[in-house]
Image: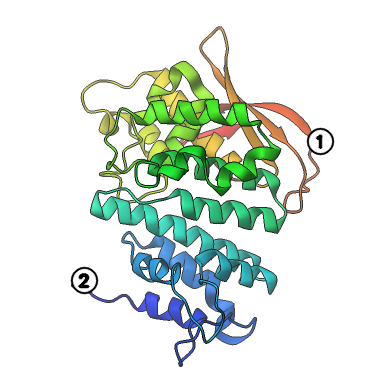
Amino acid sequence: MPPHNPLVDTFTSFFVDPNGCFQVPENIGQGCNITSVCNEILREPKPVLFDTLSEWDGARTPKVQRAPITVFSLANALRSRGQWEGAWLVAQLHYDQTLKQEAQTGTRHHKGHPACGLAILARELGSPQVARHYALLSSAGDVYWEHQLRDLEFGGYGRTMLEQYHSSQQQDAWRQRIRNMMQDSTSDQPLYLEAFLAATWFDSHARHILKLAKVKGKQGKPFVEVLLDSVESPNAAEKRRQASPVEIGTQFEAAAGLLLASTPGFAVNSARRTADEQIDLVVHYSPDKLSDIGLPQGFGLVECKSSKSLSGNFVIL
């Protein structure tokens, strides 16, 4: 049995009192440390909190309420007390720990479920574009898990949330694209949902992103980090041949697109390939409750540049 991580006890103490009842931490004392503890757990390479969150997500505690306790309900309770950052990090932990559990066990888990929690929380926080991003991930996660739950073939709540952005026909076509791209892998092989979302932006260049879609061997890193690692050291990631500039550029664009799509106010719609093989991301900005930063509302193009002469890469908007 692996050694117990004291961070788990600290995290648990926020939400479970000495009598074993669920609670919502106050905005004073130890309750103010939620964000720092969550960030420490996010930096842990192992899924130290996965079992705890999984148990809570289905636990019934009659001492507090009759409805099941869920990770989302705990995060939303924090939101209602004004701890927006702590609420988001708790919901993010659910997704992060599920990914790390996949990396550790080599088997799939229903990542569409925690992604849906993030989408709902983003909506409650007043950021419709972040809600859309995680609802898309949740819808892709339903396709990813439909071999276990056949009802997900028609879509879960993530799909319902997307009705304000896309018609049913558009969603059916999009989900079928995701389904077709996933067919190259066995139904039990863990994959990054973000790879398939980003691949829908790039059409003929999608293969450069999908080649990195397998969770195995990535140590549970977020997919953006996987993409940037490949851009930074393409020969290490591609041992059999030299990675082409188009491949590196596509992966860098995908990383920038995923970062923008998870930023309040920004929606990534597609990528545009120019005659000289350059790729521009097509994005739309709308000010919302979390991102009224003075930019005019509307569409824009994002072009990424990678420089070997500098220590790292940078993005030009």
* Residue 185 image point, x, y percent: 29, 32
Q: Residue at x 51, y 79 (%)?
A: 15
The quarter holding residue 184 reads: top left
Quarter in which the C terminus is drawn = top right
Q: Is residue 297 left or right of residue 127?
A: right
In the current view of this chain or complex, which residue is farthest to the left?
A: 1
Report the number of numbered marks. 2
Q: Secondary structure at mark 1?
A: loop
- Residue at numbered disc 2: 2
Q: Residue at x 41, y 19 (%)?
A: 245
The quarter holding residue 204 reads: top left
* Residue 83 image point, x, y percent: 65, 70
Q: Amino acid at mark 1?
A: Pro
The numbered disc on residue 296 is 1
- Could you tell me if the residues under marks 2 and 1 are in contact, i.e. CB atoms within 8 Å? no
Q: Amino acid at mark 2?
A: Pro
Q: Is residue 235 left or right of residue 291?
A: left
Distance between mark 2 and mark 1 Cα atoms? 52 Å
